[in-house]
Image (cartoon, grey):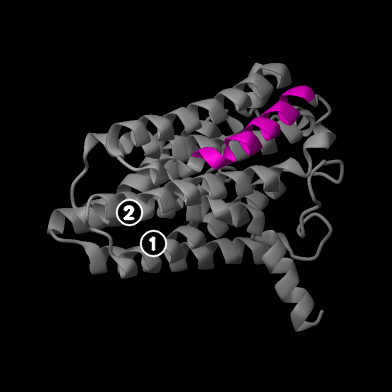
């Protein structure tokens, strides 16, 4: 196997289409820090690195956990994973998970040491970093993997919404105004929507494998209604913040993406065959990133 193909295999396993989720939460948190008058470029860059490492760790661990549990088969609708066709082994993926855990911890410590203002900050954020690493791994790894218990949506909302957005805000502003919980909620909902597309697509295989995602529990019809609800509540969250806190029309730039979100939501609601959702996962991740970029841009311009 040549060097180029090896890189390609690992790059694909990292699932680059999901990385916008990592970027989106940092964009929102840092934009809110700018809104509060405390934006710091280095803190933002360190947060980008840490969050991307955590996202890749989560993706590697997800593949490894599903492989160990036998829930990823050749019948899956989504793209065939490298471990499924033998391009990488379970041992190699396990070692990659260990390496990414170490790198994520080092990056998180570096971020915290640079940005902290008190010993309490140091202890709290290093602890949050360890918890984030454990959460990234235990989505599918372990006897009580929460992804198999239908708790994935809740954890994504917490970590991609509240922990990431409020955490990066606090490391710059060193305060937590109540209003930032609203856009943090919206950011988390868009991340949940990405997971929801994945779960809608894989519902039949997940049922067979005993992976009781929220969609397996509530059914695909309710899952499509749930998806539209996630999109609507996310937009409403940003709109509430914009109306409450902003005084310039730039504040509403994120509304430009609403027609695209509406088109996406309508497609998901109308198409009941899981295989039709195969190309939609990347689309939802892209829409989440664009929405948060426009929201952040509105803050910087306004």
Whether residue 36 is visible here, answered yes or no, is: yes
Residue denoted by label 2 = 168
Q: Quadrant of residue 172?
A: bottom left
Q: Residues within 10 Å of mark 2 (few under 14, many from 20)?
A: many
Whether residue 128 is visible here, answered yes or no, is: no
Who's the residue at 64% across and 42% down the image? 284
Q: Residue furthest right?
A: 75
Q: Are marks 2 and 1 in contact (CB under 8 Å)?
A: yes
Q: Is residue 276 magenta?
A: no
What is the number of the mark on residue 106? Answer: none
In the figure, is residue 232 to the left or right of 115? right
Q: Quadrant of residue 123?
A: bottom left
What is the number of the mark on residue 47? Answer: 1
Q: Which residues are magenta?
A: 255-270
In the figure, is residue 219 to the left or right of 118? right
Kind of element beneath mark 1: helix
């Amino acid at each position: 196997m040549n060097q180029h193909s090896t890189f390609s295999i690992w790059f694909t396993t990292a699932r680059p289409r999901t990385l916008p989720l990592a970027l989106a939460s940092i964009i929102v948190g840092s934009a809110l820090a700018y809104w509060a008058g405390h934006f710091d470029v280095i803190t933002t860059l360190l947060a980008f690195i840490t969050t991307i490492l955590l996202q890749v760790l989560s993706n590697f661990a997800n593949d490894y956990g599903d492989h160990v549990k036998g829930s990823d088969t050749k019948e899956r609708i989504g793209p065939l994973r490298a471990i499924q066709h033998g391009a990488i082994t379970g041992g190699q993926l396990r070692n990659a998970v260990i390496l990414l855990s170490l790198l994520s911890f080092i990056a998180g410590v570096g971020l915290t040491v640079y940005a902290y203002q008190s010993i309490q900050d140091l202890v709290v954020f290093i602890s949050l970093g360890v918890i984030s690493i454990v959460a990234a791994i235990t989505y599918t790894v372990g006897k009580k993997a929460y992804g198999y218990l239908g708790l994935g949506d809740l954890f994504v909302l917490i970590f991609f919404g509240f922990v990431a957005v409020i955490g990066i805000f606090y490391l710059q502003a060193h305060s937590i105004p109540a209003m930032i919980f609203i856009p943090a909620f919206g950011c988390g909902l868009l991340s949940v929507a990405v997971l929801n597309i994945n779960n809608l697509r894989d519902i039949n295989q997940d049922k067979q494998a005993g992976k009781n995602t929220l969609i397996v529990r509530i059914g695909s019809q309710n899952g499509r209604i749930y998806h539209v609800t996630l999109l609507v509540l996310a937009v409403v969250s940003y709109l509430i913040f914009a109306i409450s806190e902003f005084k310039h029309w730039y504040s509403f730039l994120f509304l430009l993406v609403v027609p695209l979100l509406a088109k996406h939501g309508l497609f998901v609601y109308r198409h009941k065959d899981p295989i039709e959702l195969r190309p939609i996962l990347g689309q939802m991740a892209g829409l989440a990133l664009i929405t948060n970029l426009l929201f952040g841009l509105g803050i910087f311009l306004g």
